[in-house]
Image: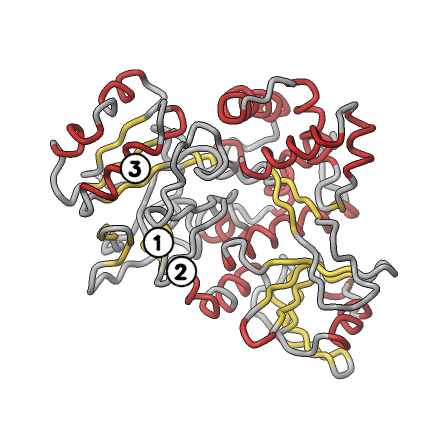
Amino acid sequence: MLPDAHYLNCDLPSASRRLADPEWFFRRLPKQATVILGEIHRLPDPTLPLKIAADVFPRLRILATGSSTLAAARKFRDTLTGRRVHLYLPPVLWPECLDVFDLPDLDRRLLCGGLPEHLLSGGKDPVYFAEWLDNFYARDIQDLFGIRERTGFLNLLRLMLRQSGGLVDYSALSRECDLSWPTVKAHLEAMTVACALFPLPPFAGGGRREIVRRPRVYGFDTGFVAFVRGWESIQDEDHGLLWEHLVLDALRVCTGDLDLFYWRDKSGREVDFLVRGTGGRVDAIECKISPDRFEPASLLVFRSAFSGGRNYLICPSVDAPFARRYGDLVVRVGSCQTLLTELSPARAHFRRCVRLAPRCRNPAIGRMWSGREPTRRSWRAGSPRGSLERRSFAPRSGDAGRWSGPCSPRRRWLAPAAPCLPRGR
């Protein structure tokens, strides 16, 4: 993978010493070199080498990985506006399990989660999840955000994972975790910035009976949701909730977290996910384990107010998409691959994809797994590279690469199209 790339693990003191003078370091490299800076948030000033590379060495191609977003962590003194794009690396997607990892067992993916190291280990290890949470606090939260209330923070994180997919109630969280209301809100913000949680905002179209303020919060990985709930196996009634997380991962890849919502009214009728498009179109996505379990009542109510857009029913057992009619409502039944195929091209104007091949990483917070290569993986010959222009990214003309999967764990590197739309996380 990128055999000519210059890789530095910023966890090592030697890497920090080499980057103490970024200008001198970059001048010694070839003009069009590819530089991978792993764990860049461990540097004293992580933005300095990135800013110098973008301003002084425009032909260098820099791929920096780390925790959280540059805009929120206090160690980052410059947000690098116009010089960078953020890419969230999700856990292994369900289509990747089928096509890349050759793991068709849905229960295993739901129970073990989507971190490649644990997913490929062959079994659930509670010690792994517990140590990961402790390490997440020590290395990311405490270091980047300066939060010292370890017990309260981890209790709140476990509670949010246990309630993953539910509506947020700050007052209830404050009582259950014995934290003040402002502290709860600050901790949740840190978890969101570090990509441990994803708040899904409600869609408000102007109806008086719509929920317009309370987000639904999802944990980043099904393995941790199952762990904090104490599940040793997946029961039939548990599939639906966890399947929503896998569909959400696919939608985040399709949309880049832009214009992604849920809809719910005060009578309890809801649509799992909505993707807002151009011209007032709103695509509705419902999640079910089996197409036979779908009840269209809520979707019919939503479409009575918002008629423009496509309707999807996403199920894990559907091989080829097909249409099903419920009165005047036409629903396209498909899988996560259907979303990746049909929604991503429609939103291509939001971004330009420059695909590189980083090493296997911790997909929850965008961190590399240094030195560990995933199994059953091949990056095909002819994969494109990106040429770094000053303050922008653009693919070279004639690049025509191929993927080893629809959304390979060796993830694409997103570069901003014109106009640049910087990512929030």
Quadrant of the rendered image containing residue 169: top right
Above or below residue 95? Residue 182 is: above
Rate crowding at label 2 as few (under 14), some (14 to 19) or many (20 or more) other CA atoms within 10 Å. some
For the residue pair 280 and 251, the one nearer the viewer reads as: 280
List x then y, in percent, for residue 78: 38, 37
Above or below residue 237? Residue 223 is: above
- Measured Cα–Cα span from mark 2 to mark 1: 7 Å
Cβ–Cβ below 8 Å for labels 2 and 1? yes
Three-letter amino acid code at disc 3? Leu
Q: Which mark is residue 305?
A: none
Q: Secondary structure at mark 2?
A: loop
Three-letter amino acid code at disc 2? Arg
Above or below residue 45? Residue 89 is: below
Q: Secondary structure at mark 1?
A: strand
Precedes in sequence: disc 2 or disc 1: 2
Three-letter amino acid code at disc 1? Ala
Residue at (75%, 45%) from the top-left corner? Answer: 166
Q: Residue 116, can we see it?
A: no
Q: Is residue 150 left or right of residue 28?
A: right
Rate crowding at label 3 as few (under 14), some (14 to 19) or many (20 or more) other CA atoms within 10 Å. many
- How many marks are shown on the rendered structure? 3
Precedes in sequence: disc 3 or disc 1: 3
List x then y, in percent, for residue 137: 57, 23
Precedes in sequence: disc 2 or disc 3: 3
For the residue pair 61 and 367, the one nearer the viewer reads as: 61
